[in-house]
Image (cartoon, coloured by chain):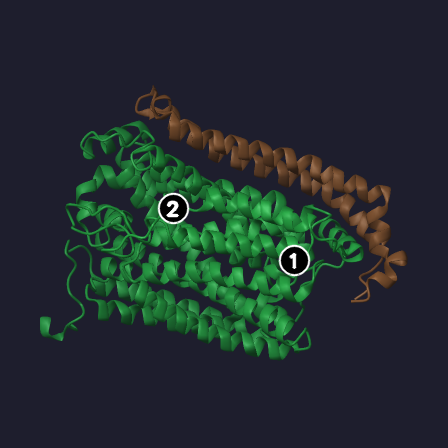
Chain colours: A green, B brown
């Protein structure tokens, strides 16, 4: 029989689960979602349909889709694994990801929904000089999307190794390409409407799957959290997995690094362009508010599930078995699923993890292509003269181009540290986007120079500090593996001591925004009046399209 | 854009300068800004305690549940609570006033 198996399908090192079953369940997901996407696309006519799903989603639907967009493989597999191996410090991560939503709820979502149309740049350039600010906002949108996309695609490679038992690079590259092609199909056929439905279905599956495992684990410990925690400590060989500090408490430097990361997490979410774009898919600011309300509940409950899943994996599977599995920390949740429900539950959880990557990647692609066509092509190159049809045509072409880049980038980045790529995306979002968003919504005096200095200053600082940080080069060589934890081996050109640039680049971007503003006299009173009145009262906000 | 030419009779500029709008803006900011300061301060207090006071956070309260876990779950509770408080306030207090003000400049002129 083994001759019939393709040479790329090498059994997993731990011999857990059935790749065929995993692929079958995932295939069913793809077929169902493709069917729904094709159905949803029948009404796709206008630009508002393609970019914003006709603004016809309800707050609840959009909130579920936001959760589907936000709960990436990094947060599902990554956080559960971090808790299983590093205990409390993994939990800290999820708290930053959740609290960040309050920034979006209180300060950004509704005002942005009222003032904008399709992209983040719509709001940033509203009362400033259109072309330079749109260009800057589009570049930082693309930078954030690029790193986030790369993280997801690189993650797909690792997931394949873990879940489908494909160990060699060629086989993994093939799967990355398949994920990329599927994602292009979703975006081309379904636009924002199709993408949203994929995210909704995936969020429901993910939260139900995690919820079932949550109850199962608690049930095994007689619904007693304290017993579960005690067993997790025991299985970890007495390591202090319930106290903070295992991962970040090593030295004074790692502590500052953790504060830097916390800052980037809590301020990054409200600057993520693909999250912001989701607020345009609802008909009003009230529905935008409801979206965030739903998203906060779903994301919060999900992270509470992962807390139990993480400690549950430590107690039931054991940190040693997790660290020895092909996906290391990322395999904690799937291994726990196998421990609880055997091959079938593992298959379902694996398929959900794949669906997760697909849905997140589709959302990023539509955001990047909207920014390229709406901001750069129409507003900067064509100076706003392109018709809606032309814009959508360009958006479709750029979606294909971005998809191809994502496939190639994902193949090259396969095996890279996913958490670092995601943290980088958050750091750029918090440095390059959030200061300008807040200034333009709340500071009367803010102007073009302030926006440009803040966006470019934040972006360049964050990128530069990352390049010269230990994540790229110069981490000590691990005696056990003989490899450095840095991206590049055998070279050391780092001079910035922290892994995360946020603690420097975020305050700097705020200062630059202020400095640029006060050194320039430009101020457009009429446009500011229009923006403030629109954003607060909702007058003149974009309406839902009717079919 | 020929905005400057119509600044004098711009309905947006008129409304922005009005007493009612100033009240709406101040109502919004007075609610949202302190709440933001509160949750950010509480979040960073928690982060700093986790970073620099692991001994305190590791103090057992009952069974294996320690202060760190309780404060961490407290972050979830406070996030949910602030969400509920804000949404209630915005639905009941803010939306009707904002809508009434939007009506004063008439239908969308687009």
Badge 1: chain ID: A
Badge 2: chain ID: A
Evaluate whether label 2 is on the same chain as label 1: yes
Please name the residue shown 52% across and 45% down the image. A506
Q: Is residue B27 left or right of residue A497?
A: right
From the image, tell me which residue sits under label 2: A496
Q: In this view, does A58 lie to the left or right of B9?
A: left
Q: In this view, does A104 lie to the left or right of A539?
A: left
Of the 4 image quadrants, the one containing the C terminus of chain A is bottom right
Q: Is residue A396 left or right of residue A127?
A: left
Of the 4 image quadrants, the one containing the N terminus of chain A is bottom left
Please name the residue shown 59% across and 54% down the image. A453
Helix, strand or loop at disc 2? loop
Expressed as whole percent of the image width and height from the top left, the position of residue A289 reads: 62, 48
- Compared with A92, A2 (above or below) is below
From the image, tell me which residue sits under label 1: A123
């Amino acid at each position: 029989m083994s001759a019939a198996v393709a040479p790329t399908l090498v059994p997993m090192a731990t011999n857990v689960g059935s790749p065929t079953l995993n692929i079958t369940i995932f295939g069913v997901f793809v077929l169902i979602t493709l069917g729904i996407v094709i159905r949803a696309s029948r009404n796709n006519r206008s630009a508002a349909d393609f970019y914003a799903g006709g603004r016809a989603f309800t707050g609840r639907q959009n909130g579920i889709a936001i959760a589907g967009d936000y709960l990436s493989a990094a947060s599902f597999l990554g956080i559960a694994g971090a808790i299983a191996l590093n205990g409390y410090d993994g939990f800290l991560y999820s708290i930053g990801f959740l609290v960040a939503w309050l920034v979006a709820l209180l300060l950004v979502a509704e005002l942005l929904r009222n003032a904008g149309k399709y992209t983040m740049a719509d709001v940033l350039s509203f009362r400033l000089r259109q072309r330079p600010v749109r260009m800057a906002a589009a570049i930082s949108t693309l930078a954030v999307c690029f790193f986030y996309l790369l993280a997801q695609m690189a993650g797909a490679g690792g997931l394949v190794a873990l879940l489908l038992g494909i160990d060699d690079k060629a086989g993994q590259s093939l799967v990355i390409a398949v994920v990329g092609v599927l994602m292009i199909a979703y975006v081309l056929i379904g636009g924002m409407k199709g993408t949203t439905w994929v995210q909704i279905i995936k969020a429901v599956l993910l939260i139900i799957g995690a919820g079932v495992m949550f109850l199962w684990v608690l049930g095994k410990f007689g619904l007693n959290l304290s017993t579960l925690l005690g067993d997790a400590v025991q299985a970890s060989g007495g390591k202090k997995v319930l106290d903070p500090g295992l991962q970040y408490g090593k030295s004074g430097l790692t502590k500052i690094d953790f504060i830097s990361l916390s800052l980037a997490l809590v301020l990054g979410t409200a600057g993520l362009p693909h999250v912001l774009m989701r607020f345009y898919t609802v008909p009003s600011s009230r529905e935008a508010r409801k979206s965030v309300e739903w998203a906060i509940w779903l994301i919060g409950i999900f992270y509470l599930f992962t807390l139990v899943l993480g400690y549950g994996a430590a107690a039931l599977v054991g940190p040693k078995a997790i660290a020895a599995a092909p996906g290391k920390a990322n395999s904690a949740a799937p291994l726990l699923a196998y421990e609880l429900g055997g091959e079938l539950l593992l298959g379902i959880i694996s398929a959900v993890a794949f669906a997760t990557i697909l849905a997140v990647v589709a959302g990023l692609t539509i955001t990047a292509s909207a920014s390229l066509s709406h901001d750069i092509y129409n507003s900067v190159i064509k100076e706003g003269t392109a018709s809606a049809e032309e814009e959508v045509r360009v958006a479709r072409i750029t979606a294909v181009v971005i998809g191809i880049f994502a496939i190639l980038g994902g193949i090259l980045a396969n095996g890279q540290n996913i958490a670092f790529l995601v943290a980088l995306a958050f750091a750029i979002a918090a440095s390059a986007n959030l200061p300008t968003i807040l200034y333009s919504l709340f500071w009367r005096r803010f102007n073009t120079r302030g926006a440009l200095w803040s966006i470019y200053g934040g972006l360049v600082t964050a990128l530069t500090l990352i390049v010269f940080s230990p994540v790229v080069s110069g981490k000590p060589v691990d005696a056990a593996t003989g490899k450095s934890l840095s991206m590049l081996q055998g070279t050391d050109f780092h001079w910035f001591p922290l892994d995360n640039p946020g603690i420097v680049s975020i305050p700097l971007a705020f200062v630059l925004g202020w400095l640029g503003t006060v050194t320039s006299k430009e101020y457009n009173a009429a446009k500011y009046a229009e923006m403030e009145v629109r954003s607060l009262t909702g007058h003149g906000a974009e309406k839902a399209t009717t079919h | 854009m020929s905005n400057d030419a119509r600044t004098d009779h711009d309905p947006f500029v008129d409304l922005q300068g009005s007493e009612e709008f100033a009240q709406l803006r101040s109502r919004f900011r007075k609610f949202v800004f302190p709440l933001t300061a509160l949750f950010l301060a509480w979040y960073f207090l928690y982060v700093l305690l986790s970073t620099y006071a692991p001994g305190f956070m590791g103090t057992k309260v009952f069974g294996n549940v320690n202060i760190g876990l309780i404060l961490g779950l407290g972050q979830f509770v406070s996030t949910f609570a602030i969400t509920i408080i804000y949404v209630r306030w915005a639905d009941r207090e803010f939306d009707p006033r904002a809508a009434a003000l939007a009506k004063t400049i008439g239908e969308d002129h687009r």
